[in-house]
Image (cartoon, rainbow, N blue to C red):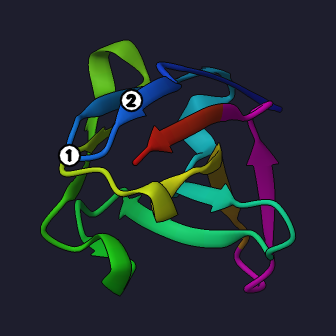
Amino acid sequence: QVQLVESGGGLVQAGGSLRLSCAASGDTFSINAHGWYRQAPGKQRELVATIRSSGSIDYADSVKGRFAISRDNAKNTVYLQMNSLKPEDTAVYYCNARQYYSDGNYKNYWGQGTQVTVSS
């Protein structure tokens, strides 16, 4: 089992920055990829950024050039640096950890979510 705890959300003006943190505990050695997702009111949860154990990274088009995902393996912590924030970035942000199995299946773990609100 893996436990995820996010922190760092809050209220910021448009153009500002925030850094989200996701601390993992438990069977962290089993994690193959970390991701940040977000869900705005009335919308589906969407992938924002992902970082794999290989080090490869992907971003949603809407955040490319503004957000950066990184990890500190020694601290079992993943970060999401968010710059040039826009009101449309307002959402609950969720940390995700994914464990892949040899048969191709996988298991997702989720944090409790942290609110990010960007005022115009």
Q: Which residues are magenta?
A: 102-114
Q: Is residue 23 above or below residue 56?
A: above
Q: Is residue 73 magenta?
A: no
* Quadrant of the rendering where the N terminus is positioned: top right
Callout 1: helix, strand or loop? loop
Mark 1 and mark 2 residues within 8 Å of each other at the beta carbon: no
Q: Residue at x 45, y 56 (%)?
A: 87
Of the residues shown, which amino acid type is indicated by label 1? Gly
Callout 2: helix, strand or loop? strand
Q: State how far apart marks 1 and 2 are (Cα).
A: 8 Å
Neighbor class of circle 2 (other Cα within 10 Å; few <14, some 14-19, many 20+) is: some
State left or right for residue 102 relative to residue 16: right
Residue 46 visible in rendering? yes
State left or right for residue 84 relative to residue 97: left
Query: Which quadrant holds residue 21?
Result: top left
Q: Position of residue 114 (x, y in %)?
A: 66, 30
Q: Which residue corresponds to mark 2?
A: 12
Residue, far front = 120
Q: Is residue 96 above or below residue 55?
A: above
Q: Which residue corresponds to mark 1?
A: 15
Q: Residue at x 65, y 33 (%)?
A: 115
Q: Position of residue 36 (x, y in %)?
A: 53, 53
Q: Position of residue 66 (x, y in %)?
A: 18, 60
Of the residues shown, which amino acid type is indicated by label 2? Val
| 31 or 71, nearer to the observer | 71
| 45 or 13, nearer to the observer | 13
